[in-house]
Amino acid sequence: MSQQRDFPKAVLYSWPSSVWSIVPQLCLYEKGYSEDEYIIKYNFNPSYLKINIHGTIPTLVVPILETTGIDVDTKYRSLKDTVSICDFLDQARSAHSSNTSSNKPAPTLGSATIDAKVTSDAIIDLIHLPAVDPNFIAIAALNAQELKEKASQRPGKSLSARREALQKYITEARESVSQPSVTAKEGSLTYNQKIIQFLEEKLKVNEEVWEIYNGTAGQEKEEQFYQVSNKAWSENLPGVLEKLEEMIEGPFTMGDQLSLADLHAISWLARIISIAGGKPVADGIDAISTKTGKPIEPKLKKFWESWLERESFQKVLVPACVAFAEMNSMNLKKRREPFVLIDQLWFPIDQLLPNDGAP
């Protein structure tokens, strides 16, 4: 009998309420990958930095095909951003792919022409602008009253939980560095020293917002925070939504067929709708209008409705919307916070004023 070896699984490091981690999960579903081909893991401690030194999610760790045979030590590569992960997943499984356990169709999501790729990339770049980053918009406060409310709800509690976790990890890493067995070459840092440097940078960014939420930042910084928050809802979001309306061909971003740009756009839109108080239903998108004061244009509304009908939306995005809603709620039941500041590095407030990349 010939010797067989189970094909090693890919690992997607994610988080339930991570907007950009939803994108590759949608891609896995739409591309027809079988659930026995990958594992989804959550990261809770600094050891994750060995996988992704930036400490961001999502990260996809995949086996290198040439090292998956019998009597061969499997080697892995890691993809550390949403765009490259989805590009890889799209190319790795096709109608002619043999390294898959799934019999589902494998539609091509990448662009077929140069012009289409330019448009697709432009849409992805548009919704990834720092000026409309859902991670900031979720903690944004238009005035002192809203800030007070959010400080007592999950946004404020999450900031405090991350602060405590980062301080704890820094202390532990410093103790490790102080051990006499830890040495580094001249002009270089040990792994633990790099961890300390990383954690201190994250703590500094988290501290800026934590101080605002806890009334220790001073009136000037609070007013600046309100200014940035108001601009996000009154100018930045309406501007991006207007451009998105112009770029969408309908019903999806590139026309009748789903594309990689759609995965980014719907994940971002669902998160913004959730922050605005909307639900994953047809009129949920109208919640954005109550915050921006601007109507939702027809192509964008059709785009939302078309996604609601897709199985991937129900299987992936509906549960994500529940997690999104929990992030905005007053339900403060104990749950572990992720090690990273969710999705990507938060942008310091002063980087969003005045040249913040808004359209």
Image (tube, rainbow, N blue to C red):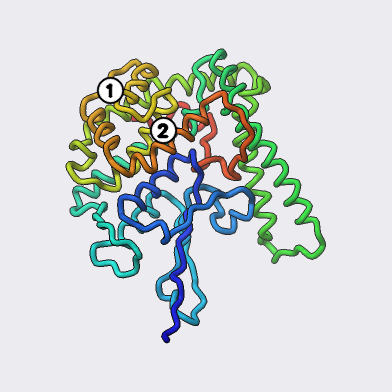
Residues at marks 1 and 2 touching, judged by CB atoms closer than 8 Å: no
What's the residue type where badge 1 is placed? Ile
What element does badge 1 sit on? Answer: loop
Against 67, residue 150 (above or below) is: above
Residue at x 61% of width, y 28% of height = 332
Q: Of residues 298 and 121, which is closer to you in this image? A: 298
What's the residue type where badge 2 is placed? Arg
- Count up the numbered dots: 2
Res. 125 visible in picture: no
Q: Is the residue marked by circle 2 packed among few (<14), some (14-19), or many (20+) residues within 10 Å? A: many
Residue at x 68% of width, y 50% of height = 196
**Is residue 322 left or right of 157 when viewed as pictured?**
left
**Is residue 206 left or right of 246 when viewed as pictured?**
right
Res. 259 visible in picture: yes
**Mark closest to the chain's N terminus, 1 or 2:** 2
What element does badge 2 sit on? Answer: helix
**Is residue 158 left or right of 29 when viewed as pictured?**
right
Residue at x 26% of width, y 52% of height = 109
Report which residue position mark 2 lands on: 271
Q: Is the residue marked by circle 1 packed among few (<14), some (14-19), or many (20+) residues within 10 Å? A: some
Locate residue 223, reporting x and y percent: 55, 17
Work out which quarter of the rendered image holds the C terminus and state it: top left
Locate residue 25, reporting x and y percent: 40, 48
Locate residue 274, reporting x and y percent: 42, 28
- How far is the residue under mark 1 from the one under mark 2? 16 Å
Which quarter of the picture shows residue 33? Answer: bottom left
Report which residue position mark 1 lands on: 296
Against 349, residue 63 (above or below) is: below
